[in-house]
Each structure stands twice: as structure tokens, then as C-alpha cells.
Image (cartoon, rainbow, N blue to C red):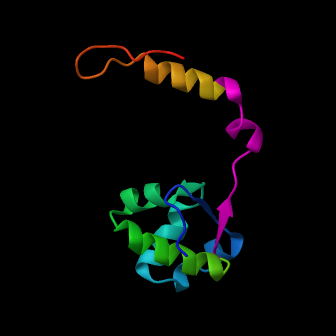
Amino acid sequence: RTMPVETQLVATTDGLDTLDRLSFEQHDIVAACRVPQSIAEIAARLRLHLNVVRVLAEDLRAAGQLSVHVPDSGVTHDASVLRRVIDGLRAIPDSRGVLRDSD
């Protein structure tokens, strides 16, 4: 099973300590994950195919060189933030210049 592209990864201490022993692509992935990065962000930054990053990241995670970063749940479940995002999206006119109806 592959990781979703939005999965956030962060380098472990072991991963950073072994940078010089990793292959070129693995080195770049671990180095990019000094701060949490999604698989999609890593692929774009390193200009690698998304599936290549998925496979390499899973190998690095299994080896203990990357870990999955779980964002603060209080931030991701804030209903007021979601409501503002929905309202903002509805305020964008469609291709005909018509605003979407609100509920």
C-alpha cells in the first residue's frame, strides 16, 4: 500500500545522521524533510516522479530515517477555519462570473 500524496514526512535523527550513506535521491528526500513536507511537495521540489518519491519515502520510513508527521488535530478540526475556506471558495465567481449559491 502506498502513502497518500498529502502524507507529511519528517526526517528522524537517524535519517539525518546517515545522510552521507544514502543514495542520491534518498539523501535529497531526507534532507528536504528537515521540516515536515508532503510527498507531493517533495516530488515537486526535487523534480522527481510522484511514485518514485512514494516508494523511496516508504523505504526510508521503514528503515527509520523518516517518520510520518501528524499535524496538531486542534488545527485540522477547527470548524470555523473550514467555514471560512468554504465561504471563500463560494466568493470566487465561476467562468461566467456567477457566484455560487450559499447553503
Q: Quadrant of the C terminus?
A: top right
Q: Give the tally of numbered discs.
A: 0
Identify which residue, 19 or 65, lies in the foreground: 65
Q: Position of residue 79 (x, y in %)?
A: 69, 28
Name the residue: 34% across, 68% down. 49
Q: Is residue 66 above or below residue 71?
A: below
Q: Position of residue 90 (x, y in %)?
A: 44, 20
Q: Position of residue 62 (x, y in %)?
A: 64, 81
Q: Is residue 19 left or right of residue 17?
A: left
Q: Quadrant of residue 16?
A: bottom right
**Residue 50 counted in the magenta span:** no
Name the residue: 53% across, 55% down. 6
Identify which residue, 35 or 83, lies in the foreground: 83
Q: Quadrant of the N terminus?
A: bottom right
Identify which residue, 6 or 87, lies in the foreground: 87
Q: Quadrant of residue 36?
A: bottom right
Q: Is residue 62 above or below residue 4?
A: below
**Residue 71 counted in the magenta span:** yes
Task: List the single residue furthest toward the right.
Answer: 74
Q: Is residue 10 left or right of residue 90?
A: right
Q: Is residue 73 above or below residue 29?
A: above
Name the residue: 37% across, 57% down. 44
Start-end of magenta stretch? 65-80
Q: Is residue 5 above or below residue 26?
A: above
Q: Quadrant of residue 3?
A: bottom right
Q: Position of residue 26 (x, y in %)?
A: 48, 77
Name the residue: 61% across, 80% down. 18
Q: Is residue 55 left or right of residue 13?
A: left
Task: List the single residue furthest toward the left.
Answer: 96
Q: Is residue 43 left or right of residue 95?
A: right
